[in-house]
Image: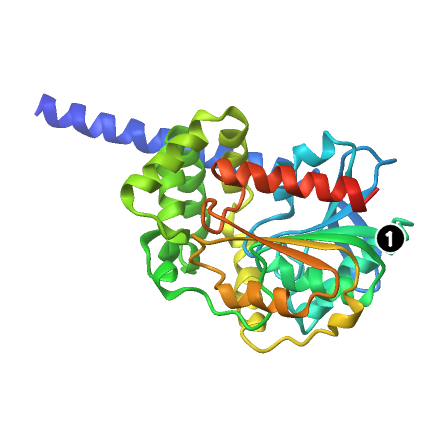
């Protein structure tokens, strides 16, 4: 009987600690939301983040699908180099109505309303993953000095079914218990970063188990990359605030997208990974075929996470060199 009571006590204490930690997680994420800036536009009030020196050259950062605008905090290598980076919230994220605009092209219009409201005349653009579509529309329709794209979606997009049906994919794509899943993911990356990195690689990269573990080891052994991994995972939480936007973008990107490539004539540098499971090569080939003034590079980096691994570092260095040449 005493043994049973002790077990029940341990379980009760564990549950109480978990509930307390979950509440702290929600509180910390609310504190992050409180740092968001807000501007009134013709689309209503729009949240954004503006980091780096205000006098620096401006880079408009278009986040990947399912990530919050606080993902921009990973780009300290740009702010350290003197760049001002602006990330604008999109429909379906953090309470912004999904029907604010009716297309991905409309995301570029929202971006421009914020840029215009801030009195900025021209920007360079940095687009990642599905944020590549918004970036291309922005570059087509508004003044842009230069553009960098990482693993960009450039046309009709359908999620990789192997990734969707993976354990991590099922968690992310599910509409159940979103905030609890988010809490568990953030605790995982804080306590078990190598396991967390390997889980993302299993979902997003064409790597065998040995290669995944070696790359995950590389991430956690690099202080800056380990920190950026944490920032990345925390930017995916809580999923209840991001899920509507992510699913809306998946739906809207599943139809064809047509660009006037002659208008996307600024210098463009695009990177894609040969290991990427998520965005197929056809998206990159489309850039190779149509860019007026662009360079496309394949690297063997961390799958869809083009900044992971030694070649990923080369992506960061190449992107910074490109912006230094064309964004200033």
Judge whether 212 appears above or below 304 on screen. Answer: above
User: Looking at the rendering, in which quadrant would you find the N terminus?
Assistant: top left
Q: Residue furthest left?
A: 1
Q: How many marks?
A: 1
The part of the image, by quadrant, that contains residue 277 is bottom left
Q: Percent from the top left, x then y, of residue 105?
A: 71, 69
The structure residue drawn at horizontal position 51% and vertical position 53%, both measured from the top left corner, is 240
Q: Would residue 194 be found to the left or right of residue 77 on screen? A: left
Q: Percent from the top left, x then y, of residue 94?
A: 63, 53
The part of the image, by quadrant, that contains residue 95 is bottom right
Q: Percent from the top left, x then y, of residue 64?
A: 58, 54
Judge whether 189 appears above or below 1 on screen. Answer: below
Could you tell me if residue 32 is visible in this image? no
The residue at which mark 1 appears reads as: 122
Q: Would residue 78 be found to the left or right of residue 71 on screen? A: right
Badge 1 marks a residue whose secondary structure is loop
Q: Nearer the viewer, residue 93 or 272?
A: 272
The part of the image, by quadrant, that contains residue 187 is top left
The structure residue drawn at horizontal position 38% and vertical position 39%, both measured from the top left corner, is 196
User: Looking at the rendering, in which quadrant would you find the C terminus?
Assistant: top right
Q: Would residue 225 be found to the left or right of residue 100 on screen? A: left
Q: Nearer the viewer, residue 216 or 47?
A: 216
The structure residue drawn at horizontal position 60% and vertical position 69%, both measured from the top left corner, is 286
Could you tell me if residue 153 is visible in this image? yes
> Badge 1 local density, few (<14 within 10 Å), some, or many (20+)?
some
Q: Would residue 163 be found to the left or right of residue 47 on screen? A: left
The structure residue drawn at horizontal position 49% and vertical position 30%, both measured from the top left corner, is 226
Judge whether 141 appears above or below 268 on screen. Answer: below
């Amino acid at each position: 009987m005493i043994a049973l009571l002790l077990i029940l006590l341990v379980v009760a204490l564990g549950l109480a600690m978990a509930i307390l930690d979950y509440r702290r997680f929600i509180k910390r994420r609310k504190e992050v939301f409180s740092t968001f800036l807000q501007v009134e536009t013709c689309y209503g009030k729009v949240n954004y983040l503006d980091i780096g020196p205000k006098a620096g050259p401006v880079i408009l950062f278009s986040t990947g699908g399912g990530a919050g605008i606080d993902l921009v905090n990973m780009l300290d290598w740009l702010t350290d180099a003197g760049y001002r980076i602006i990330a604008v919230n999109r429909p379906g994220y953090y309470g912004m109505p999904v029907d604010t605009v009716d297309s991905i092209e409309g995301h570029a219009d929202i971006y421009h309303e914020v840029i215009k409201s801030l009195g900025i005349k021209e920007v360079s653009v940095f687009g990642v993953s599905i944020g590549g579509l918004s970036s291309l529309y922005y570059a087509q329709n508004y003044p842009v000095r230069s553009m960098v794209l990482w693993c960009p979606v450039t046309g009709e997009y359908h999620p990789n079914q192997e990734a969707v049906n993976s354990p991590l994919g099922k968690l992310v794509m599910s509409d159940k218990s979103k905030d609890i899943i988010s809490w568990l993911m953030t605790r995982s990356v804080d306590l078990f970063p190598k396991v967390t990195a390997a889980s993302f690689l299993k979902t997003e990269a064409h790597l065998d188990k040995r290669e995944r573990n070696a790359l995950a080891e590389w991430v956690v052994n690099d202080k800056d990359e380990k920190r950026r991994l944490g920032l990345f995972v925390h930017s995916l939480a809580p999923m209840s605030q991001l899920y509507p936007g992510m699913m809306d973008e998946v739906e809207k990107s599943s139809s064809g997208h047509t660009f006037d490539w002659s208008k996307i004539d600024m210098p463009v540098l695009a990177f894609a990974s040969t290991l990427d499971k998520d965005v197929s090569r056809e998206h990159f080939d489309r850039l190779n075929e149509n860019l007026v003034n662009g360079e496309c590079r394949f690297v063997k980096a961390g799958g869809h996470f083009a900044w992971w691994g030694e070649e990923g570092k080369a992506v960061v260095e190449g992107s910074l060199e490109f912006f230094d040449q064309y964004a200033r």
